[in-house]
Image (cartoon, rainbow, N blue to C red):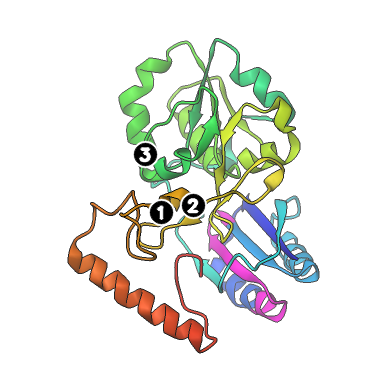
């Protein structure tokens, strides 16, 4: 059984590059896979490995400057959900492209999962899903607004074009684990919106803590690892991943004429050329050859 830890923390790292090598070595020494991102604004990532290895990495992270109160969310999988380890330096730990946005100067009001239903069913509250369109497509909260954004970078433009819809409304926002809402709520506060709230711990914490009988969540939650999606209780969902377009698909989608493993699915079959598909077929051949030799091959989940 592998322990999966999802985490983020905003703090000031003067020299993220100095943090990278010892963190990478610690992860390697403890059999950790997944991704950790480091930037001047903090850290973000999801990692998986043995219980003792995860505990060692978490202890190391909490010993970094300003990270003593770092929180994380845990789940488990019988399979290793990542193919390799990445510890990377980035400009932002979640990319919004707004230089004035700084969650350390203030965010929306945190709302515990147990209090979320009461908030979002209030008539004066507008609920906004800050995730990407393909994530929203497989599950969201009942009544939530989908901005239909392909990237988190698109959110500020969407808000500017739609802000008049939310006059005299309180705004409640949510995302997978909470990190995007740290920035999106700070952004709205900077735009003069006064009553802004966000789900503490994100969808993952809600699905972990709120019983399905009391839940207003509909569908599954996309996750960026080998499980692809999770449902209530963080049980692994039914989705697979199309390795051509990186969108989640259901088992029945794999029975359609438009599906070819690693080449196309119902979502992307009409978006790529035959030359693209030939290139994807060659990639799949190389993956199969690598697996036959007992080697790992880089892909979306690597």
**Which residue is outermost to the bottom?**
293
Asked if the residue at tag 1 contacts the one at tag 2, i.e. Cβ–Cβ closer than 8 Å, the answer is: yes
Q: Does 82 sit left or right of 267 as displayed?
A: right
Res 99 visible: no
> Disc 3 or 2, which lies upstream in sequence?
3
Cα–Cα span, label 1 and label 3? 28 Å
**Element on which disc 1 rests:** helix
Q: Which residue is mark 2?
A: 251
Q: Does 7 sit left or right of 103 as displayed?
A: right
Q: Which residue is mark 1?
A: 255
* Viewer-side label of 1, 3: 1
User: On screen, 200 above or below 58?
Assistant: above
Q: Nearer the viewer, residue 177 or 157?
A: 177
Q: Does 128 sit left or right of 231 as displayed?
A: left
Residue drawn at (69%, 54%) of the image: 66
Q: Which mark is residue 25?
A: none
Magenta span of residues: 25-43
**Element on which disc 2 rests:** helix
How packed mark 1 is, by other alpha carbons closer than 10 Å (few <14, some 14-19, many 20 or more), is few
């Amino acid at each position: 059984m592998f322990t999966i830890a999802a985490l983020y923390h905003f703090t000031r790292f003067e020299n993220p590059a100095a943090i990278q090598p010892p963190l990478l070595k610690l992860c390697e020494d403890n059999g950790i896979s997944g991704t950790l991102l480091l930037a001047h604004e903090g850290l973000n990532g999801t990692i998986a490995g043995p219980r003792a290895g995860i505990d060692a990495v978490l202890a190391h992270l909490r010993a970094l400057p300003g990270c003593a109160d770092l929180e994380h969310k845990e789940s488990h999988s019988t399979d290793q959900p990542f193919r390799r380890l990445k510890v990377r330096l980035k400009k932002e730990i979640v990319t919004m492209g707004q230089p004035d946005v700084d969650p350390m100067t203030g965010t929306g009001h945190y709302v515990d999962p147990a209090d979320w239903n009461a908030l979002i069913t209030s008539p004066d509250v507008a609920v906004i899903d800050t995730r990407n369109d393909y994530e929203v497509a497989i599950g969201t909260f009942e009544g939530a607004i989908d901005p239909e954004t392909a990237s988190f970078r698109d959110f500020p433009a969407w808000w500017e074009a739609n802000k008049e819809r939310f006059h005299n409304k309180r705004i409640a926002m949510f995302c997978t684990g909470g990190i995007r809402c740290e920035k999106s709520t700070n952004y709205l506060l900077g735009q003069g919106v006064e009553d802004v709230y966000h789900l503490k711990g994100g969808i993952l914490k809600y699905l972990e803590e709120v019983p399905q009988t009391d839940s207003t969540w509909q569908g599954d939650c996309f996750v960026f690892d080998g499980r692809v999606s999770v449902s209530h209780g963080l049980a692994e969902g039914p989705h697979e991943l199309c390795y051509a377009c990186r969108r989640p698909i259901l088992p029945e989608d794999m029975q359609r004429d438009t599906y070819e493993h690693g080449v196309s699915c119902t979502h992307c079959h009409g978006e790529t050329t035959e030359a693209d598909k030939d290139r994807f077929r060659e990639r799949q051949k190389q993956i199969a050859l690598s697996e036959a030799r007992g080697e790992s091959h880089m892909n979306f989940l690597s």
